[in-house]
Image: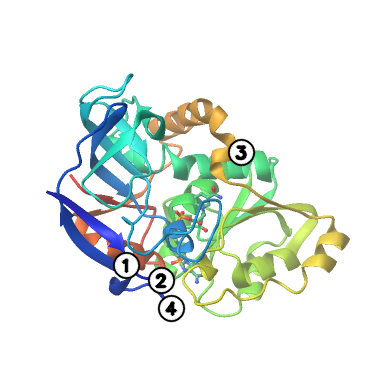
Amino acid sequence: MNRQWLYAKQPQGKIGKDTFEWREVAIPEPQPGEALVRTRLLSLDPANRAWMMGKTYRDALQPGQVMSGFALGEVVESRAPGLAKGDLVEGDWGWQDYAALPARQLTRRITEAPIELLIGPLSVTGLTAYFGLLEVGQPKPGDTVLVSAAAGAVGSMVGQIAKIAGCRVVGTAGGQDKCDWLVKQLGFDAAVDYKAGNVFRALRAACPDGIDVYFDNTGGPVLDAALALANLRGRVVCCGNVSQYDVERPAPGPMSVPGLVVVKRLRLEGFIVMDFYDRRAEAEARLARWIAEGRLKAELDIFDGLETAPDALIGLFEGNNRGKRAVRVS
Ligand SMILES: NC(=O)c1ccc[n+]([C@@H]2O[C@H](COP(=O)([O-])OP(=O)(O)OC[C@H]3O[C@@H](n4cnc5c(N)ncnc54)[C@H](OP(=O)(O)O)[C@@H]3O)[C@@H](O)[C@H]2O)c1
């Protein structure tokens, strides 16, 4: 059988278990030009929730469809040129054991690294951190880099890459444990628990020379504070807005934006990681080397079993992950 989680209904406010529905159907037959893929790992991403809110960089999810999500799997039968049984592939076939897909929707992965690294650090997560920080943020040695959701998948890599680039690095995260982990294990210079009180005051103390690059994963109050503390010609890398995904209606943006942006000559620039996929190989090779050399820790947070996918996603909005959250399906 092919076990699947369907996206059942649009949440009003926070997602819950009733956002999803379990179903078991027959395993699909691959048609000419398609490969049948068996899921090994599923990536859990805050964006999965954002796709429920309406059109983003992709069409909105529709109730009744298989829940979308980035996945890594193995070809079990191929009628597609260029793909053979046993090939490792990635794609967006969602929360299910099997999918039959045309070859153009699958990317073949050849690696010597543990396959768990291919669901995040050596794929979307690592590439987002790498290109977002180095290309959009343009950090220079000695700059102060602030990153939010710093103990999460993207944020933890951003902070470490910024250290490799010679920057002073400060992160925000929910809770003292995560903050201690950032400083003691990942080498951040300072970390601020944004849930512990006045985040502006805490960031001002943690960034005595102001902020040159803010890598924004969250929006919300940390963005407000970062804009106020930004240095002249500072850069804000607009990567995501996780504080506003799991809500009924996103809050309005910071009122201070036009004035601060003008006076400080700030550059706020959004990006989607796929914008840089023509340079994917170069970035993955560098990330793999840093990981192998022990300069970049790729923290994984893996749930076991397709059944756990809703809890794994809900947990991202409770901040109960550290590093890259994924589900091992087979
Ligand atoms: N632009 C792109 O191409 C691209 C690609 C991938 C990801 N992203 C974005 O990158 C960001 C991080 O994604 P990720 O995959 O690395 O997820 P993640 O950081 O591993 O997980 C989400 C984290 O967000 C934090 N969070 C949850 N609710 C929050 C709130 N209300 N306010 C502040 N923080 C909150 C939680 O940490 P705490 O315990 O610290 O609250 C949680 O661990 C997201 O905004 C995502 O959309 C963008």
Closest to the camera, between mark 1 and mark 3, is: 1
Tag 1: amino acid: Ala
Q: Name the residue under label 2.
A: 10
Coloration of the structure image: rainbow
C-beta proximity under 8 Å, tags 1 and 3: no
Name the outermost residue toward the right. 263
Residue type highlighted by circle 3: Ala
Residue position for label 1:
8
Instruction: Give SS at disc 3.
Output: loop
Whether residues under marks 4 and 2 lie with C-beta atoms below 8 angstroms apart, the answer is yes
Say whether disc 4 or disc 3 marks the residue closer to the N-terminus.
4
The three-letter amino acid code for the residue at tag 4 is Gln
Q: Mark 3 points at which residue?
A: 165
Q: In this view, does 264 lie above or below 166?
A: below
Chain-order first, disc 3 or disc 2: 2
Of labels 4 and 1, the one closer to you: 1
Task: Name the residue that disc number 4 marks.
Answer: 12
Q: Please, which residue is most extreme toward the top here? A: 82
Seen at 44% across and 71% down, the residue is: 175
Q: How far is disc 4 from disc 1 in space, using C-alphas?
A: 13 Å
* Residue closest to the eye, 184 or 297: 297
